Amino acid sequence: MTEKAPSRIRCDIDFEKIGRQLGYLRAPHSRNSSGWGTIEIPIVVVSNGKGPTVLFTGGVHGDEYEGQIAVARLARTLDPARIQGRVIMIPAVNIPAALNNTRLSPIDDRDLNRCFPGDPRGTFSQMLAHFIDAHILPMVDVSVDLHTCGHSGEAAPSTNMHYLPDADMRRRTMEAAAAFGAPYNAVFWGVDEGATLTSSVERRGILSLGTELGGWGRVSVAGVSIAERGLLNTLKHFGLMEGRPDTRQADGAPGTRHMMVRDPANYSFAPADGLFEPCNVIGDSCREGEIAGRLHFIEDVDRAPLEIRYRRDGHLWMAAGSGRVRRGDAIAVLMQAYDETAAAA
């Protein structure tokens, strides 16, 4: 490994060692009851022979469960003898949030996925983001970061990726998404992407995939299954494991549908605080002008609900759950079939 940037986080893993290792990222956390306390984040490394290094992460947001389950299960069961290369697995990156069942860290009330590339002298989330960016990513060839919508909504089971200006990297990433084998792969331009783990991965020229595999604060049976198969498919696709990826879909489709979220009009936002009643479920085909949902004001019974309409045609990728929303919350995100010419416009 090259010389690392200074960090307050310590790790007892020897990343060059062959075999399976279970260790911890130990982040200092001084509190009233323990001046020299630490937060321990489990990490498993499985290595054998020569080959690429793949990073699998879950739990960057603590209330997104499918990735935590899938990465943890693979970390327990992956036999080094089956691997040619190195697999780094962190099932619950933001473990304080995972144990607290929240998106944000209860340590500093920050969204870890808006803290990259981090700060070694900053808060817990900033310190952890820096360690991943400066100490883990330089070893990595491929990163798969597993997400869902947590408590904020639900997503059609999908991989996702940024639209990449480099045509070769864009092609390779779309091929990796197809090999992962989720029902959809969403190529998107994002809303607030510069400080995410994905953005840090891309800045280092590393192939990056994300996922959205469920939500509404529950564990999706289908989401866990797609995640587990997708992780193995990824290892097969990049030659770390023998075999061909299985990309068959539950509806009989032969593989992943490439989609895109290119137009800001794909996003619908709540115009006020209220109780949101959606009119569609994820994956539905929606038309411009149709009602996406109604915003109710139960504290003012005589006030008529507001109708929120789609601003273009598409399939529903992400949807807010039935429940209260705040003004400015995204309540629906549409996607369209991927078109290279339109994407490049």
Image (cartoon, rainbow, N blue to C red):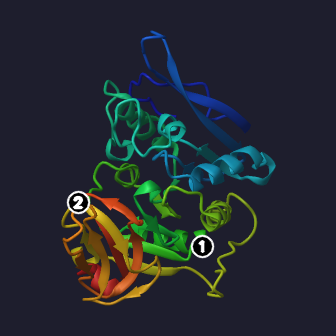
- Residue 97 image offset from top left, x and y in percent: 47, 39
Kindly state the secondary structure of the residue where label 2 is placed: loop
* Residue in view at x 52 percent, y 41 percent: 98
Of residue 21 and residue 191, the one placed in the foreground of this image is: 191
Of residue 108 and residue 247, the one placed in the foreground of this image is: 108
Pointer 2: residues within 10 angstroms few (<14), some, or many (20+)?
some
Q: In the displayed structure, would residue 247 be above or below residue 20? A: below
Mark 1 lies on residue: 181
Of residue 24 and residue 304, the one placed in the foreground of this image is: 304
* Residue in view at x 27 percent, y 82 percent: 310
Of residue 78 and residue 329, the one placed in the foreground of this image is: 329
Mark 2 lies on residue: 273
In-image side of 98 versus 342 (left or right): right
Amino acid residing under circle 2: Asp
- Residue 78 image offset from top left, x and y in percent: 75, 49
Q: In the displayed structure, would residue 127 be above or below residue 153? A: above
- Residue 176 image offset from top left, x and y in percent: 54, 69
Amino acid residing under circle 1: Gly
Pointer 1: residues within 10 angstroms few (<14), some, or many (20+)?
many
Kindly state the secondary structure of the residue where label 1 is placed: loop
* Residue in view at x 27 percent, y 79 percent: 344
In-image side of 178 versus 298 (left or right): right
Q: In the displayed structure, would residue 270 be above or below residue 292? A: above
Could you say which disc has been placed on residue 75 in the image? Answer: none
- Residue 343 image offset from top left, x and y in percent: 30, 80
Tell me, yes or no, whether the two marked residues, 2 and 1, touch with CB atoms within 8 Å: no
In-image side of 302 versus 99 (left or right): left
Say which label, 2 or 1, has the lower sequence index. 1
Q: Is residue 157 visible?
A: yes
* Residue in view at x 63 percent, y 35 percent: 16
